Amino acid sequence: MELAGVRPMKEQILDGVSLVPLLKQTSVLSRDAIFSHHPEYVVAYAKTPCSMVRKGNYKLIHYFGDYLDPTGCEPGRSGDLCGKFILGSRTELYDLKQDLGETRNLVHDMPQLAEELLADLNSWWSSTGAKMPRPNPNMDRSKWKWNTNK
């Protein structure tokens, strides 16, 4: 926002610091954790609403709802969503020092850390008044236009 010359809306609670000193390499980040929140669906990217927290080497991602599991899909297929439609939320945990590509979900191997990071997310949602995704009461899954069992 600072680089773009944009001011936040008065009613918006921002939990952030300027990244300009980091980009100019004149400072280091002095935060224990970094949070990110995306409460919307972006169908074009098969993106599910999610929140993330990065603390130390670990990154926890909490997905709020249904998603496409792309396992077995061919990469780079343009204009065609591929994957199995999975109902319900899920949480993933990665050690970015050992697994930068986020290929090994550690949520079941490290349940205590996953619970701690999820509690951090809950506190952060509360403190920032984060808008949470809401189910669409008019969603009719039988009219989902993509074949998601490819």
Image (cartoon, grey):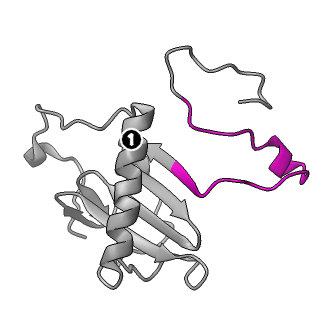
Q: Could you tell me which quadrant the C terminus lies in? A: bottom left
Residue 82, percent across and down? 33, 64
In the image, residue 30 above or below residue 3 = below
Q: Nearer the viewer, residue 76 or 17?
A: 17
Q: Secondary structure at mark 1?
A: helix
In the image, residue 15 above or below residue 36 = above
Question: Residue 24 magenta-drawn?
Answer: yes
For image coordinates 18% across by 38% down, the residue present is: 135
Number of labelled discs?
1
* Segment tinted magenta in the rendering: 14-35
Q: Nearer the viewer, residue 137 or 98?
A: 98
Question: Residue 108 magenta-drawn?
Answer: no
Residue 22, percent across and down? 81, 51
- Within 10 Å of the Cα at label 1, are there few (<14), some (14-19), or many (20+) other Cα atoms? some
Residue 70, percent across and down? 35, 70
Q: Is residue 69 visible?
A: no
Q: Is residue 92 visible?
A: yes
Would residue 6 appear left or right of 127 to someone viewing this image?
right
For image coordinates 77% across by 27% down, the residue present is: 4
In the image, residue 52 above or below residue 110 = above
Q: Amino acid at mark 1?
A: Trp
Q: Could you tell me which quadrant the N terminus lies in? A: top right
Residue 57, percent across and down? 58, 74
Which residue ends up furthest to the top in the rendered image?
10
In the image, residue 138 above or below residue 10 = below
Would residue 111 appear left or right of 55 to someone viewing this image?
left
For image coordinates 32% across by 56% down, the residue present is: 63
Residue at mark 1 = 125
For image coordinates 10% across by 40% down, the residue present is: 140
Q: Main secondary structure of the magenta part?
A: loop
